[in-house]
Amino acid sequence: MHLRLPSIDKGVQAFVWAVVFFLVIWIGGKAVGVEAATSFTIGLVAAFLIWLLIRTRGDDTRTRA
């Protein structure tokens, strides 16, 4: 019997990373005195860009040049 974690799709992994970084940016921005709406907007834009970056380039396989 082999015990290993189930395979998780790259899109799900990218979404989880985006949500985590969104929360860090949003809560961190509010903690240092940035307006709530500004912090939320910056967090959303950053989360989308993080999701896009991890979704497109976050692959474990390496290609040989």
Image (cartoon, helix red, strand yellow):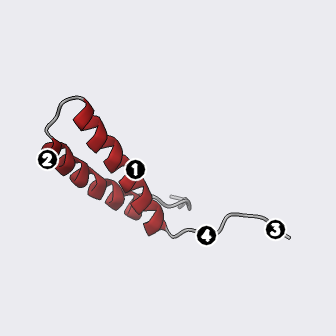
Is tag 1's residue or tag 3's residue first in the polypeptide sequence?
3
Using the numbered discs, state the Cα–Cα distance from disc 4 to disc 1 in whole angstroms. 20 Å
The residue that disc 1 covers is 20
Quadrant in the picture for residue 17: bottom left
Using the numbered discs, state the Cα–Cα distance from disc 4 to disc 3 in whole angstroms. 14 Å
* SS of the residue under disc 4: loop
Residue 59 as seen in the image, left or right of residue 22: right
- Type of amino acid under label 3: His
Image quadrant occupied by the N terminus = bottom right
Mark 1 closeness class: few <14, some 14–19, many ≥20 residues within 10 Å: few
On residue 2, the disc is: 3
Q: Nearer the viewer, mark 1 or mark 3?
A: 1
Residue 53 at x, y = what percent?
A: 35, 57
Using the numbered discs, state the Cα–Cα distance from disc 1 to disc 3 in whole angstroms. 31 Å
Q: Tell me what residue is drawn at x 43 percent, y 58 percent.
A: 16
- Type of amino acid under label 1: Val
The residue that disc 2 covers is 37
